[in-house]
C-alpha cells in the first residue's frame, strides 16, 4: 500500500466553514486537503439569503460547487469521503482515515456541522413551507400565517420572535407535553400566539409545491405559508471527542476566537461551534481559523531560538517557504490576472433595432 500523503492542514467537512478555511490555508501557502462526505446544511438551501455579493437565486449546491472549484484552483486537494477515524501520532501529527483515503497531517480542522432533528411526517418540503433557518427565512413570512413546531423553550421563543414579522403565529406541539419553563409559559400566555396541541392528520399543498394548510386530529384546518420545526440539533462531534476536544453543554465544540479547540492542533469552525449558524458567520470563522493555521505553520519569520537551533542565518536558498507545487499554482493565477484585458471597441455606432 502506498504511503499516505502528507499535508499541513486537513479540513474535515466541505460546507462554507471548511471551504473558507481551506481557501485561506491554501492561498497562504499550506498543503491542504479537504475530505467531505457531501450534503450538509448548506447543500439543503434552495436559494441563498444574507450572503452579500451572492445572488439570492443561487442554490446551496451551486454555491458549494463554485467554492470547491476555487479551492482546487489554488492547489487544495479534495476527496469526497467520510472521515471515520483520526488518531494522534507519536510525532504530534495525525493519521486521518476516510474510506480508501488515508492522510498524515499537522493540523486538523473539523467543519462537520450538525443535522437538524426532523419531526415525524406529514411535513412540507424544505424551502416550500418547512424552514430550518430563522434568520434566513423569517423575512419571507412577513404578513403570512406561520407555524412553529415543538414543545420546548426554543419553539416557544421562536413563535414569539415570529410576531416581529406577522400577526398570525401558531405554536404546534403535536400532542407532546410542553417542556418550556414557567417563565416562558408566562411570556407565551401574554403574547398573541395560538398554541395548538392536536396532532397533524394531513397536509394540503398548492400546485407550486408550497404548503397551504394542515388538518388536525380534531378535524380543524389551519392555513399556513410555512414555518419552523424546533426539535434541536445532532452535532457531528464524534471525531472531536475521539481527539479529546472539550464540548460545551449544548453539544457544540468549545473553541477560542480562532477556532482552536482544547486539543492541540485540532480546530473547529462553523455550525459545529457556538454561534449564529449562518453562512457569513461560518465563513468568518473559517477565515479566522485559516489565518491562525498560517500563523502556526508558516516558516518565516523564524524565532531567534529556531535560528540558533538551525545554526545561524537563513540562507536565501531555503526561501521561499512554500512548496513548489503551490508556487506554480500561484504563478498560473498571477499570469491569468496579468493577461491583457480583452479590448472593447466603444467607438462603434450602436446597432439599429
Ligand atoms: C434549509 C436551510 C437553508 C439555509 N439557508 C441559509 C441562507 O439562506 N443563508 C445563510 O446564511 N444560512 C443558511 N442556512 C444555514 C447554513 O446552511 C449553515 O449555517 C452553514 O451551512 C454552516 O456551514 P458549515 O460548513 O458549518 O456546515 P455544513 O454546511 O452543514 O457542512 C458540513 C459538512 O461536513 C460534512 N461532514 C460531516 N461529518 C463528516 C465526516 N466525518 N467526514 C467528512 N465529511 C463530514 C457534511 O457532509 C457536510 O458536507 C440554511 C440552513 C438550512 C438547513
Image (cartoon, grey):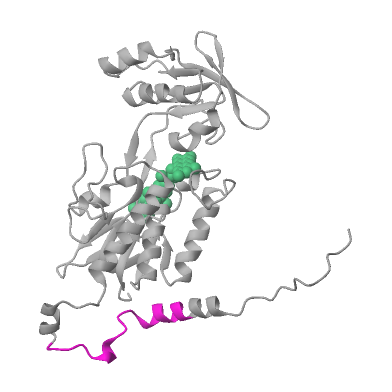
Q: Position of residue 296 (x, y in %)?
A: 23, 67
Tell which residue pokes out farthest to the front in this image: 347
Whether residue 261 sits left or right of residue 73 in the image: it is left
Magenta extent: 311-331
The answer to whether residue 323 shows anywhere in this view is yes
Residue at position x 27%, y 54% in the image: 259
Q: Quadrant of residue 304?
A: bottom left
Q: Which quadrant of the figure contains the N terminus?
A: bottom left
Between residue 251 and residue 199, name the one nearer to us: 251
Q: Position of residue 255 (x, y in %)?
A: 23, 50
Q: Classify residue 72 as left or right of residue 315.
A: right
Residue sitting at x 29%, y 43%: 274
Q: Does the magenta segment cover residue 312?
A: yes
The residue positioned 21% from the left and 88% from the top of the image is 314
Q: Residue at x 38, y 50 (%)?
A: 282
Residue extending furthest toward the right: 352
| In magenta segment, residue 165 | no
Q: Position of residue 3 (x, y in %)?
A: 30, 76
Amino acid at each position: 500500500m502506498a504511503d499516505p500523503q502528507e499535508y499541513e492542514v486537513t479540513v474535515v467537512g466541505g460546507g462554507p466553514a471548511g471551504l473558507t478555511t481551506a481557501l485561506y490555508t491554501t492561498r497562504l501557502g499550506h498543503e491542504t486537503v479537504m475530505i467531505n462526505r457531501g450534503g450538509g446544511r448548506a447543500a439543503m438551501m434552495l436559494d441563498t439569503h444574507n450572503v452579500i455579493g451572492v445572488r439570492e437565486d443561487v442554490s446551496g449546491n451551486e454555491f458549494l460547487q463554485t467554492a470547491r472549484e476555487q479551492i482546487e484552483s489554488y492547489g487544495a486537494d479534495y476527496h469526497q469521503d467520510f472521515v471515520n477515524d483520526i488518531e494522534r501520532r507519536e510525532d504530534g501529527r495525525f493519521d486521518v482515515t476516510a474510506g480508501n483515503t488515508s492522510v498524515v497531517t499537522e493540523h486538523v480542522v473539523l467543519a462537520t456541522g450538525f443535522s437538524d432533528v426532523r419531526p415525524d411526517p406529514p411535513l412540507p418540503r424544505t424551502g416550500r413551507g418547512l424552514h430550518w433557518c430563522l434568520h434566513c427565512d423569517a423575512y419571507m413570512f412577513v404578513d403570512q400565517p406561520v407555524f412553529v413546531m415543538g414543545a420546548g423553550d426554543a419553539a416557544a421563543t421562536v413563535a414569539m420572535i415570529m410576531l416581529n414579522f406577522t400577526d398570525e403565529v401558531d405554536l404546534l406541539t403535536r400532542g407532546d407535553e410542553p417542556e418550556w419553563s414557567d417563565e416562558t409559559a408566562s411570556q407565551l400566555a401574554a403574547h398573541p400566539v395560538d398554541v395548538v396541541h392536536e396532532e397533524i392528520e394531513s397536509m394540503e399543498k398548492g400546485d407550486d409545491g408550497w404548503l397551504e394548510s394542515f388538518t388536525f386530529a380534531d378535524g380543524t384546518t389551519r392555513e399556513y405559508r410555512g414555518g419552523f420545526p424546533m426539535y434541536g440539533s445532532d452535532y457531528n462531534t464524534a471525531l472531536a471527542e475521539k481527539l479529546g476536544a472539550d464540548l460545551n453543554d449544548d453539544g457544540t465544540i468549545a473553541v477560542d476566537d480562532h477556532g482552536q479547540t482544547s486539543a492541540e492542533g485540532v480546530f473547529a469552525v462553523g455550525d459545529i461551534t457556538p454561534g449564529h449558524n449562518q453562512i457569513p458567520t461560518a465563513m468568518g470563522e473559517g477565515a479566522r481559523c485559516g489565518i491562525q493555521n498560517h500563523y502556526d505553520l508558516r516558516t518565516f519569520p523564524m524565532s531567534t531560538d529556531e535560528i540558533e537551533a538551525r545554526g545561524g542565518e537563513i540562507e536565501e536558498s531555503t526561501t521561499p517557504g512554500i512548496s513548489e507545487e503551490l508556487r506554480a499554482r500561484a504563478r498560473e493565477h498571477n499570469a491569468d490576472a496579468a493577461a491583457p484585458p480583452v479590448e472593447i471597441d466603444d467607438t462603434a455606432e450602436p446597432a439599429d433595432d
